[in-house]
Amino acid sequence: GPNQYKIFSSGMNLQSYRTFVLQNDLRRAIERKEFSLVFQPRVNMKTGMVTGVEALLRWNHPNLGCISPGEFIPLAEGSGQIIGMGEWVLRYACAQLRAWREAGLPPVRIAVNFSAQQFMQKDLIGNIRRILSDTQIPPELIEIEITESVILKNEKNIINTLMQINEMGIWLSVDDFGTGYSSLNYLRRYPVNFIKIDKSFVQDLSYENSNSTALVSAIITMAHNLQMSVVAEGVESMEQFNILQRENCDEIQGYLLSPPVPAKEIEVLVAGGHPY
Ligand code: C2E
Ligand code: CA
Ligand code: CA
């Protein structure tokens, strides 16, 4: 193109070229305002009320269209850009909460996903405090989702940080539960409020498959005994819903209720009072 060139060698295949382009473009994505958040409601199984929403990041690339987080989050983690992106996500989520409050909506909690690298940054707690105070959002309206791998990374620092997050009043959940670290010992020591059962377990649930039901049932019982609530992710069918209800699961999230949607559609759900 005019006044620019790019080097491409025939040894590079198309996939690595795409990765190269995405890695490069990711650096400017925030300032070019190419990111947005969509929100997926989480519903209490007993009351049918929306208890909160999960914020999920979307990247609208100018040439390649919508890129899935499954593709660009690992790139951002590899390059360290996830730190800036994570901050953007939290700030944007708080700004959204503020907009909902100003529109007169009842308070709804937003859960944001945190990568392991975000716990390596020097002043994570200071940054979180600053964002909450800039946007005037009470910590109880924020939930942080971490995976089991976060807990594995750097035990002493992490537990300290998680304790501080907990003392601030922010909620904490363990995402993709059952797919990562196999030791359950950590659960006792970390201030976890919610366990999110990974969708791979939920998708195996059926009346015929008693093994997968036994597994989910055991996770729910264990969590309840540890005073934690359970969220089932990726609920797509009424059969899964009914089994989860029978097993006393607390909350569900999944396409059965709603896919992740733009903020405007969440407003309609929450303002309606009793959506499900
Ligand atoms: P996750 O945190 O486990 O998020 C749930 C994923 O499952 C989302 O995919 C959501 O769209 C999808 N999902 C929801 N309901 C259903 C269902 O009923 N069936 C099926 N098959 N899928 C369902 P998405 O939005 O593509 O995000 C993928 C992953 O990218 C997330 O998995 C999370 O690990 C990561 N991610 C997304 N946003 C962020 C972010 O802001 N920060 C970080 N660090 N990671 C993020
Ligand atoms: Ca999540
Ligand atoms: Ca998950």
Image (cartoon, helix red, strand yellow):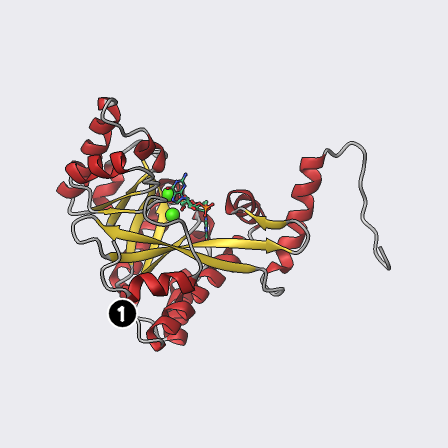
Residue at 15 percent of width and 41 percent of height = 248
Q: Residues within 10 Å of mark 1 (few under 14, many from 20)?
A: few
Q: Pick whichever, 19 or 158, lies toward us.
A: 19
Q: Is residue 250 left or right of residue 159?
A: left
- On the image, the x and y values in percent for residue 83 come to 50, 56
Q: Quadrant of residue 242?
A: top left
Q: Pick whichever, 26 or 115, lies toward us.
A: 26
Q: Is residue 190 left or right of residue 200?
A: left
Q: Is residue 97 left or right of residue 193?
A: right
Under mark 1, the amino acid is Pro
The residue at the far right in this view is: 2
52 relative to 149, above or below: below
Q: Which residue is mark 1?
A: 106
Asked if residue 108 can be seen in this view, the reply is no
- On the image, the x and y values in percent for residue 97 come to 36, 68
Asked if residue 256 can be seen in this view, the reply is yes
Residue at 22 percent of width and 60 percent of height = 274
- On the image, the x and y values in percent for residue 111 come to 35, 56
Residue at 66 percent of width and 54 percent of height = 25
Q: Pick whichever, 18 or 127, lies toward us.
A: 18
Q: Is mark 1 within 8 Å of ligand 2?
A: no
Residue at 22 percent of width and 23 percent of height = 210
How many dots with numbers? 1
Judged from the image, the secondary structure of the residue bearing numbered disc 1 is loop
Give the quadrant of the N terminus.
bottom right
- On the image, the x and y values in percent for residue 95 come to 42, 70
